[in-house]
Amino acid sequence: MTLDFTPPPSGFYDEADCDLAEFAALTGRTVDRADIPQAEDAPGNVPVYDMAKLAPRLDEGATRRALMAEWARILREGAGVFVLKRACSDLDAIDDATAAYEAIIAAERAAGGTGADHFAAAGSNDRIWNSLQKLALTAPATFVRYFACPAVDAACEAWLGPNYQMTAQVNLVHPGGQAQEAHRDYHLGFQTAAISATYPAHVHDLSPLMTLQGGIAHCDMPVEAGPTKLLPFSQLYRPGYAAWRRPDFRAHFEAHFVQLPLRKGDAIFFNPALFHAAGANSSADIHRMVNLLQVSSAFGRAMESVDRGAMCRAVFPALLEAGLPAAGLEAVLGATAEGYSFPTNLDSDPPVGGLAPKTQKALLREAVTEGWVPEHLDRELAAMAARQRP
């Protein structure tokens, strides 16, 4: 399949212009087995690999690259998702990590934490934000055994290249837990529709290349336990970050999604632009735990370290006096303050009025438009920095 990356005439994607028929045609494709020669099968158009058999190929440069290239093609121009059976062979390490995570959940509950989900109703699950750091600090030996997983490392490198940045969040969905709504994921999937629409079309194309979504199963998950609902090939629909909230697109997802059962130690990886949603846990006694991996490119960093809080404090009095028109104010805000919500500490800095926490840029804009005194801004910047701190 040849991908057309010609931008729309306006240079931007608009929710009203999204075409369900085009989306249905793209997602109605079938996986060509010739494109996934090393896969064991492709049930529901999801390629499945048996890593107990393929593990030796990760030890040699040529065979490792061939396997990673196959996975990258799936993520970019194929089904958009693949499953690695028996990706994590040390099941005792998974059990020990599960016990550590359950202790963390209990401690956070006792401390009054909510563990809210981005896309599911409150109370249907327990969430551990930054489960990566929390496991490393509370059970370092378990952390080492748990992440000593060459298959996970190869999957991350296949999409992002070396020196990727790992983050993780545990999601524990109890019996009766509700399903999520269909969505796309970080980066643009965590913005409101209005904010997403302000990014040019080519940034919509770039965003999925900067992040890889994954998950490690901590228990056996038959379909009734609600493993992730997936719509293969949906990452190919370029305006999808504008479309995923539309009721007709979500209805199409609900009519055509697939779910694959997973076993403890299996891993799933998918393009963050793939339409997906956690399923409803209709089981009687399965507490479905997945460690969600959200892995980022090493290139998602600025060249210099900048103390933007100090800059905000320094320029604020001048901004108050300047009386700039709106366009000029926005230009100065963009050069001065941090305009992006992440990375942050989602335990103490949860989303406000959407899927993302308040930005430093929004705070400085508020201070200027409302005419705060410098001491007020200083307190708010300090409180924001404290919330963002790990």
Image (cartoon, grey):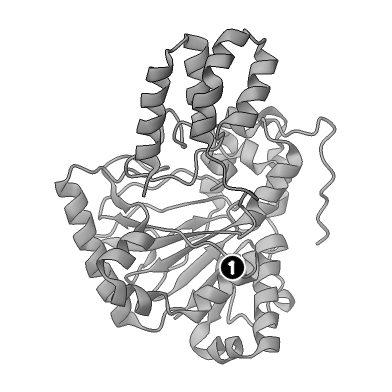
Task: Give the residue number, with chain letter if any, for mark 1.
Answer: 163
Horizontal and vertical percent for residue 114? 26, 42
Instruction: Identify which residue, 300 or 266, lies in the foreground.
Output: 300
Among the 4 quarters of the image, the one containing residue 175: bottom left
Image point (32%, 44%), residue name: 347
Residue 238 visible in rendering: no
User: Which residue sits at x=30%, y=55%?
Assistant: 173
Depicted 363 relative to depicted 202: above or below:
above
Q: Nearer the viewer, residue 135 or 367?
A: 367
x, y percent for residue 290 = 37, 62
Residue at the image position 53 percent from the left and 25 percent from the top: 314
Horizontal placement of 28 versus 84: left or right? Answer: right
Q: Say which residue appears at 70% left-offset and 61% top-offset.
A: 76
Front residue of this view, candidates 261 and 373: 373
- Left/right placement of residue 135 relative to residue 184 reads left
In this picture, residue 95 sits left or right of residue 256: left
